[in-house]
Amino acid sequence: MNQDLSITALVLQASLVVQVVMAGLALTSLASWTVIFGKLFGLKKVRGSNEEFEREFWSGRSLTELNTAVGQKPHTAPMERIFASGMREFLKLREKRLDAGAQLDGARRAMRASFQRELDVIESNLSFLASVASVSPYVGLFGTVWGIMHAFVGLSNLQQVTLATVAPGIAEALVATAIGLFAAIPAVVAYNRFARDIDRIAITLETFIEEFSNILQRNAGGSVAATTMGSGAR
């Protein structure tokens, strides 16, 4: 007797528990793809805005002019916010007439705190992808085990069991594992890719903090307004 073994038929014929597992995995996969595309465009925007500010930073403008320009922007890059926090603390300590070492230490602490905040924002939802990648296969396996168990319980009432009677129940159960892998594999690939990209962004920001700290150290006793960031300042 011919039986419909299409994916749609197998899902509709599965037990209630397996269907709930499949629906949960499908929603998780949808949420995962939403995070993946959001993070993909978000990291691209972060890299582009950081590179744009870095070019502006080394273009020859004074620190005061650059700080004023950053403060007037409605949307700023992570590197710009780190720069602004360092400049704000540096100028505040300079107004209190503290020594150059205290000014530099305060600016570095402010930039480090801002760096950690920016990194937390950039890494948002990354843990969700890690959870999807690690948990989804096991959830799918649970659905498969439950479906196979349900199928064999139904077969216990039959006097004659053939492959034709066993195959549909097992196939229904295996769909849950397939959906679990469908949710997990893209999440694993995306997590590894985004983790690598975020590490590169973090290295870029840390390098900027060190370069800016060196500039502040060289000019701690002079006029910040006269300090320009030309290409030769590196």
Image (spheres, rainbow, N blue to C red):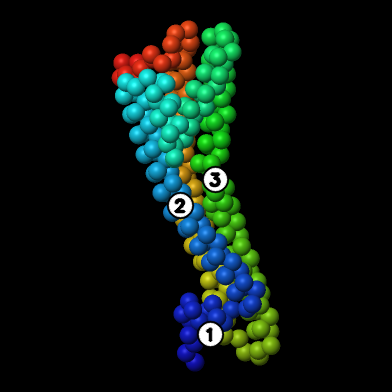
The tag earlier along the polypeptide, 3 or 1, is 3
Q: Identify the element where label 2 is drawn.
A: helix
Q: Quadrant of residue 19?
A: bottom right
Amino acid type for the residue under numbered disc 2 = Gly
Residue 38's disc number? 2
What residue is shown with label 3?
Answer: 124
Q: CA gap, disc 3 to disc 1? A: 49 Å
Above or below: residue 116 compared with residue 39: above
Label 2 or label 1, whichever lies nearer to me, is 2
Q: Residue at x 44, y 8 (%)?
A: 222
Cα separation between marks 2 and 3: 11 Å
Please say if 157 is above or below 96.
below
Q: CA distance from mark 2 to mark 1?
A: 45 Å
Q: Quadrant of residue 15?
A: bottom right
Q: Observer-nearest residue: 60 or 186?
A: 60
- The residue carrying mark 1 is 164
Q: Amino acid at mark 1?
A: Ala
N-terminal-most mark, 2 or 3: 2
The crowd level at tag 1 (other Cα within 10 Å; few <14, some 14-19, many 20+) is few
The residue mark sitting in front, 3 or 1, is 3
Between discs 2 and 1, the one toward the N terminus: 2
* Residue type at the position of mark 3: Ser
Q: On the rendered structure, is 157 left or right of 102?
A: right
